[in-house]
Image (cartoon, rainbow, N blue to C red):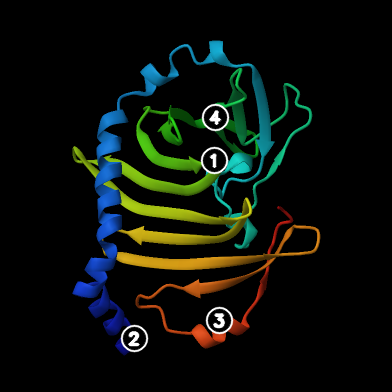
Amino acid sequence: MLNNMQRIDEYLKSDENSKRCEPFDQLKIKYVALHKLYANSFHELNKDLESKVIKREYAKGGEVLHRGFYSPSTLDLIVGNYNRGKLLKRISNNTKYNYEYLFDAQNSLICVYSYYIVEDVFKLISTELFVRNQNKVLSLVFSTDDYSLSFISECQFENGKLISYETALCELLDSEVYCSEINVETYEYVDDLMKSMCWTRYSPSIKLLTQERYIFSRDTDGFLSTYKVEHIEGFMPKMKELQSRQIYNVRVKRR
């Protein structure tokens, strides 16, 4: 066990790992800069927001995924306990929900309120606001207590299809912006249907980078049915022959 840990530690400090991490270190720089740019923008972005709202929707559950029911991620297809929750058809004054979604006249999501629910406690904990620029959508999650910016994501689209989804956990510590985690999902399509997803997780402080590619198959009705996993090179053990024989079931029925 100790030898394995030593090998991992040596790999994390190696030039090979540093080279693999370079693009994601650049992402860290990007999100630190975005945090500095938008850290004090809550009131400006939130101004007159309610006047633009045409429709509201409410959802319960889905706390594990960013934004719950309307999460851009497809991880609930493959990972256990990643549940999107469900939209509520009816609400009353006593209804408790985890998410409130606000839409404008173009049916674009313009705000997400996230709520904390434990027994009789029902409290707004964060507000997610959006900045749109052509084929990119930047989202900024602000804490309700002090309006601090703690989470940033960016979705990039091509011909209406999501091709990349990035998230970054950033916070202000001792007047410096600290980025503790970056996640990136990239998507490949064939005939307008998702064929594969690459999931990258990066911890900048220790240069820990893991990458996996999920290759999907569909049933005769066109629904996602099974997938294979490829571990992209790094300190992960090489199990290509084993991987080629392993097929997993997609957890959620979706096209």
Distance Cα–Cα, label 3 vs label 1: 33 Å
> Disc 4 on helix, strand or loop?
strand
Query: 217 above or below 253?
Result: below
Distance Cα–Cα, label 4 vs label 3: 41 Å
Which amino acid, mark 2? Asn
Query: 165 above or below 235?
Result: above
4 or 2: tag closer to the N-terminus: 2
Distance Cα–Cα, label 4 vs label 1: 29 Å
3 or 1: tag closer to the N-terminus: 1
Nearer the camera: disc 1 or disc 2: 1
Residue 113's tag is: 4
Residue 67 locus on image (x, y percent): 55, 40
Distance Cα–Cα, label 4 vs label 2: 44 Å
Q: Does any portion of residue 243 appear in the rendered image? A: yes
Which amino acid, mark 4? Tyr
Task: Count up the numbered dots.
Answer: 4
2 or 3: tag closer to the N-terminus: 2
Q: Residue at x 61, y 38 (%)?
A: 117
Which amino acid, mark 1? Asn
Q: Mark 3 points at which residue?
A: 243
Q: Is the C-beta separation of discs 2 and 3 under 8 Å? A: no
Observer-nearest residue: 100 or 229? Answer: 229
Q: Mark 2 points at which residue?
A: 4
Q: Is the C-beta separation of discs 1 and 2 under 8 Å? A: no
Distance Cα–Cα, label 2 vs label 3: 21 Å
Q: Quadrant of the N terminus?
A: bottom left
Q: Is the C-beta separation of discs 3 and 1 under 8 Å? A: no
Q: Residue at x 42, y 66 (%)?
A: 211
Q: Is the C-beta separation of discs 4 and 1 under 8 Å? A: no
Q: Mark 1 points at which residue?
A: 159
Task: Using residue 58 as the reference point, say whether residue 184 is left or right of it.
Answer: left
Q: Residue at x 58, y 53 (%)?
A: 74
